[in-house]
Amino acid sequence: MQKRLMEKIEKIETEALGELYQQDFLLSWRHSEAALRAVLQTAEALRTLRGEGTASRVFDNGLAVSLFRDNSTRTRFSFAGAANLLGLAVQDLDETRSQIAHGETVRETATMISFLAEVVGIRDDIFLGAGHEYMSEVGAALEEGYREGVLPQRTTVVNLQCDRDHPTQSLADLAHLIEQFGGVEQLRGKKIAMTWAYSPSYGKPLSVPQGVIGLLSRFGMQVSLAYPPGYNLIPEIEELAANNAVESGGAFTRHDSMAEAFENADIVYPKSWAPYAVMQRRTELLTQQDTAGLKALEDDCLENNRAHLDWECNADLMSHTRNALYMHCLPADISGVSCAHGEVSAEVFEQHRLATYREAGWKPYVIAAMILLSRVRDPRATLEQLATAGRPRVR
Amino acid sequence: MQKRLMEKIEKIETEALGELYQQDFLLSWRHSEAALRAVLQTAEALRTLRGEGTASRVFDNGLAVSLFRDNSTRTRFSFAGAANLLGLAVQDLDETRSQIAHGETVRETATMISFLAEVVGIRDDIFLGAGHEYMSEVGAALEEGYREGVLPQRTTVVNLQCDRDHPTQSLADLAHLIEQFGGVEQLRGKKIAMTWAYSPSYGKPLSVPQGVIGLLSRFGMQVSLAYPPGYNLIPEIEELAANNAVESGGAFTRHDSMAEAFENADIVYPKSWAPYAVMQRRTELLTQQDTAGLKALEDDCLENNRAHLDWECNADLMSHTRNALYMHCLPADISGVSCAHGEVSAEVFEQHRLATYREAGWKPYVIAAMILLSRVRDPRATLEQLATAGRPRVR
Amino acid sequence: MQKRLMEKIEKIETEALGELYQQDFLLSWRHSEAALRAVLQTAEALRTLRGEGTASRVFDNGLAVSLFRDNSTRTRFSFAGAANLLGLAVQDLDETRSQIAHGETVRETATMISFLAEVVGIRDDIFLGAGHEYMSEVGAALEEGYREGVLPQRTTVVNLQCDRDHPTQSLADLAHLIEQFGGVEQLRGKKIAMTWAYSPSYGKPLSVPQGVIGLLSRFGMQVSLAYPPGYNLIPEIEELAANNAVESGGAFTRHDSMAEAFENADIVYPKSWAPYAVMQRRTELLTQQDTAGLKALEDDCLENNRAHLDWECNADLMSHTRNALYMHCLPADISGVSCAHGEVSAEVFEQHRLATYREAGWKPYVIAAMILLSRVRDPRATLEQLATAGRPRVR
């Protein structure tokens, strides 16, 4: 048992750790492949540690601040679980109960909540062109606070979903793929279909598909992105994926048919999102607080969606894949279960349901790994110390 | 001091522990008398441990999820205190801030919040015929998750009040009685009057009186249930209490007069509730979202209540008891204090106020006992280890 | 390193510790100067401990209850950080989700939330003549609960801002001054201008200026209080400051001009508040739930404020000080940043911005000191034990 754990710990690559220590984790593409592998390896070591029932408290005390500007269940609980696993206490920043409305600047709030905080996890995915900028601004304030001796530590920011990327999701997805296929090297040449899917809802963020194509294109995979005409993602991120594919020896293709993308796929990831143009317009209307305009946009968008009811992941489409692994960030819109027509047929979803739960199960460990690598200079030593101490998690 | 603690620990009966380990605690009547005694004995040991100022942390880390579908102060704090006593961190599942509305199934949510959770405490008492079913569904999902290797542990569910039972309350009540009367055997033959009482409010759950009669009828007590005509509880649970009484050598009687029930009572528990028929109708109307119907029902019910203003626990009625112990789950509707006419006169309440606080004081320990017994295979060994280590709770 | 820490610990004066142990901290002027010095010295020792990266967990378990009846970011996070620093878990009492509306008395709620609580931190600053009374009532209930054996400990109340005082703020301010001027003795004779300042908002509590003049007048400072005619504080507290100044060998003067107060000041604290008379009227209207009256009062008050747009801390005014330290409890209303005209010019604020962050950074340690001194009989021994153990905060 403990031997297996030690092996996991020793597998953590150390070359890129300096790139993560005391740094925010905002966009997966800002980090080297080695750094991302270190996150995944640390996540695996932490999961093994917990699986073996070993105490994993790294911090005697410290806060993990969570700031959710959009609803969340699984990411909120993943963050809470990750923080707790390492010994941090979660403190929510609830903007409705704070004095923020009252003219407070981002810079100031960031400092005020961070005197005793190790990490600030932020979800801010409603406004296009705002979420990432906000997180960067918080990060810059924390950097200034540390440099100027106002903060006793360089509290770090972890992106729990912005308008561009959702790195804790995409890295959990990648960890799941590595587990399912038996190693990151086994992913080379595998075909993943990241496709739009029909949903009776509107305004779903772009960050999941963007995060997936931005990350998986770096590991030699054949990434096929499919969506109905006009449903594109942020153009720069589609380009980035294309460039990644060239560099990693994989491929990145675009399709306007779900069936085409599914053809011979090893993995499918059918998921609804709002078109980039709609998200841009929506951001404008939200900024102008144009309620009537927002309603009109929603109606419009839902009607457009209805032209693509056939973008549903069902048994017929699945039969053209190589017995593909089905992925979803959850919750999925399941036809006949959560809505009349949705992203996936009840039959296909039920068949793969437990696998999607396993996929989600990686997220707490990925977040814990991000926290640990940003807070501790020598995470291998820290983990080895925990493993050697071998204190039981439950007395 | 420590000797007393060790005696308490050694008193924990071990024969029925297997019935509690990795099992949900939903209804007291699903558990054997031996199992219930083990809960009470463990609660007492934990209270002694804390009273002696000894550290009681059993978990290095782990979440205790709380899901309150109805307002709560004392149960919420009892759960928080219990979790903290054992070393768990509370994480609220706030359904208004989650993505649950968004088509998520119970099964999925249950799994998503439980990756790193030891226990999920649920209050769901608004809909008749729904609360217990919901908790059972959560429990089944956690069972599946554990069996299928999705969850690293069999997270357990603790009922913090459903439509049928309120076991953390009724067991706290029983612990209080045992303390007041000097042992569970001393309760044999004692008469308890569990009676309806007038309140200017409507829609109070049935779970407290049901929990009380369903539990105390098992310990050879004379349980007298009284309510105005038409104010009955769920019929199956009244029957269950009657059967329990036969088996335990006690008695279960029904009355339509408060005075009759109080006659020679050793304990009185006067408490308002909405009639079963009203709760059924209310559940229908809530399901149909029939606001006008709900208003009409409320008016109707309040008017009916007003015919029973005399169901107030006052000095005159108390004078016909054997100097009875007054009990209440709190908050009580006190005549002239919280309302013009209520469940209890100010005089009687004030006389027994501190005793009701003591009654409430058992709840954190009962919940902690339920958590411990569901999570740890050999709770005596765990507690002995804590006692022997003898680390001070406050350094 | 450790030597420095030990020196800080040894500096904690012990003569007045008995005055703080198991006592609420409600008003700074209820405590002796020696007791206040002990709070500050303990805060400094805790900050040093944390700064040196030493584990500071004093409690194996225990709750720190927070009850905020007004919005808060920095005090909420300061309380959370302080509790966590010592090993306590924060549990919010959210009155909107509790059963308190439901006729529950203060006395009862206070007890119900405190069975396993070490401390209850309360912000209640909306109603004049109510906040302090509420906290006193809670304290009395906790005292009764402990005396009667209902509570296993004398849970203590910490005032996180009431209608009269804001002692965690004023003591953080004092700690900041001591740090900036090199010792409490260095404050003797220094001039501080505590002045009203213009803000486009209304209804700001009086507790900050009251707390500041009530505290700093005790350390031989020259306290100059300035406000436009009619903008006075609670008269009894102005008198108290005057008396303090006489006793401490300082001075207390009143002015109706910002410029006059700033003249040769060593420290300036320009901060908006609502006049006492307005707060009285507002409290009446709030009690009567007179929405129209409240709106009229607000309009009136904002118009009155507009006559004093020139009460802005700007470079010109600052040039008449002795290169004064600028203080603010934050968030400040900054002209051209958070509003067109505000309490302070953008230029002056930016120049002193980091210093105000440092000022705020003391608050978690002041609160932690208050908690520690109320919970532990010999805080020096506790701190020495932590220092000697020298366990790293981050493994």
Image (cartoon, coloured by chain):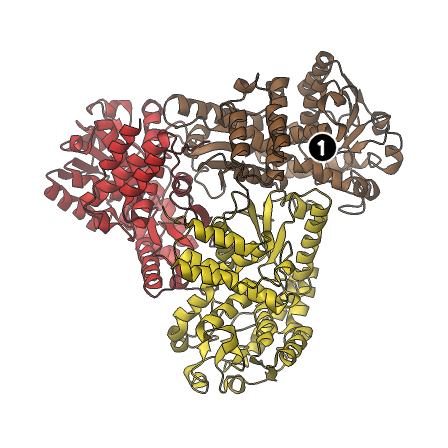
Chain colours: A yellow, B red, C brown
- Mark 1 — on which chain does it sit? C
Badge 1 crowding class, 10 Å Cα cut-off, few under 14, some 14 to 19, many 20 or more, is many
Q: Position of residue B232 (x, y in %)?
A: 23, 45
**Furthest residue to the top?**
C247
User: Could one spot residue B96 in this view of the protein?
Assistant: no
Q: Position of residue A83 (x, y in %)?
A: 51, 51
Q: Nearer the viewer, residue B142 or A377?
A: A377
Q: Position of residue C31 (x, y in %)?
A: 60, 19
Q: Position of residue C24 (x, y in %)?
A: 53, 25
Q: Nearer the viewer, residue B16 or C24?
A: B16
Tell me the residue at 62%/18% (across/down).
C34
Is residue B129 found left or right of C301 in the rendered image?
Answer: left
User: Could one spot residue B352 in this view of the protein?
Assistant: yes
Total tally of numbered discs in the picture:
1
Q: Nearer the viewer, residue A392 or A123?
A: A392
A275 versus A88 height, above or below = below
Is residue C39 found left or right of B214 in the rendered image?
Answer: right
A77 versus A295 height, above or below = above
Is residue B256 found left or right of B339 in the rendered image?
Answer: left
Tell me the residue at 34%/52% (across/down).
B157
Is residue A118 found left or right of B150 in the rendered image?
Answer: right
Question: In what quadrant of the picture does the N terminus of chain C appear?
Answer: top right
Q: Amino acid at mark 1?
A: Trp
Q: Secondary structure at mark 1?
A: loop
Q: Nearer the viewer, residue B198 or A191?
A: A191
Q: Report which quarter residue A26 is drawn in.
A: bottom right
A170 versus C178 height, above or below = below
What residue is shown with label 1? Answer: C273
